[in-house]
Image (cartoon, rainbow, N blue to C red):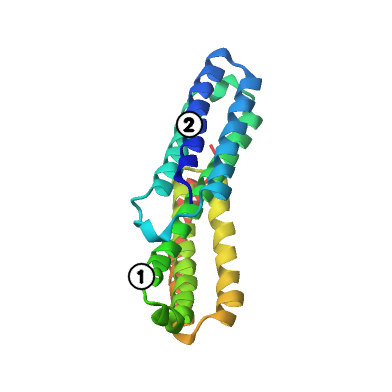
Amino acid sequence: YPERDYWLPIIWSMGALLGGLASLYFKNVYLQATIIITFIMAAVHLLFKEGSVDIATYTPLINIRVFSFLAVVLAGVLYMNIFNYFKDLFDSANTKNIKGGFYFVISFLLLYLVSREVLDIFNKQFYSLSPEDQSAKAVSFDNQKRAALSVTWTLYSLIMLVIGIIKKSAWTRLFGVVLLSITIFKVFLYDTANLDNFYRFISYISLGLILLLIGYLYNRYKSRITEFIKVE
């Protein structure tokens, strides 16, 4: 797991951020398109080249993967805030599509990072076991990882829904709904077939509680939520 490549997406995203400022200053659509492509390249590089870590030296949350992902996400968020401030300089339809695409990619990057961190925490614990214990506890660790991933995705989708309502972002709400739907299918189709009873119970209970909370909050504050999520 060579760490020398982690700096590439960071440099690309920071360069794209500076180039984005220039594109807004010169009102150059072609430069703006180049900036967006550069951000996409940084995201793709992170996902396919820098998603793994060396478990032997891995430290949860405090590692180069987290730093590089958060650096790219921060650059993207800063660019979108600046872009939103100068949105009147560009076509309104394109502006909405660009913002939506950016927020969708940023949400996915954060979801991927959180998921990998959760899984690698278990992988780190498993790596520290003796070969005999690894053989005996392999199934148990697999069950724990699947259940933890289901809980993580459920909580993340709830957070996305809340942020989408507060920020009046249809793309963020859509991401939350899609992820929650995927999680429901994962729990009832994949987890049911592969998890032990205890971890299956944990997945069911966690998902059920989140769905009950969403239903309660929607019915309790239905009028406020309906008014709040109206697109500006």
Q: Is residue 106 left or right of residue 120?
A: right
User: Residue at left 56%, top 22%?
Assistant: 88
Mark 2 packing: few (<14 Cα in 10 Å), some, or many (20+)? some
User: Residue at left 47%, top 50%?
Assistant: 110
Q: Is residue 211 visible?
A: no
User: Residue at left 37%, top 77%?
Assistant: 130
Q: Is residue 70 above or below residue 89?
A: below
Q: Is residue 83 above or below residue 64?
A: above
Of 26 and 208, the residue lying toward us: 26
Which of the 4 image quarters holds residue 198?
bottom left
Q: CA distance from mark 1 to mark 2?
A: 34 Å
Identify residue for label 2. Answer: 11
Residue 93 coordinates in the image, percent (x, y): 65, 31
In primary-sequence order, the first of circles 1 and 2 is 2
Q: Residue furthest front?
A: 131
Q: Residue furthest top?
A: 26
Q: Nearer the viewer, mark 1 or mark 2?
A: 1
Q: Is residue 175 visible?
A: yes
Of 184 and 39, the residue lying toward us: 39
- Which amino acid type is marked by label 2? Ile
Q: Which mark is residue 204?
A: none
Residue 213 coordinates in the image, percent (x, y): 43, 67
Q: Residue furthest bottom?
A: 197
Of 168 and 26, the residue lying toward us: 26
Mark 1 packing: few (<14 Cα in 10 Å), some, or many (20+)? few
Q: Which mark is residue 128?
A: 1
Element type at mark 1: loop
Residue 126 coordinates in the image, percent (x, y): 40, 72
Element type at mark 2: helix
Q: Is residue 35 left or right of residue 54?
A: right
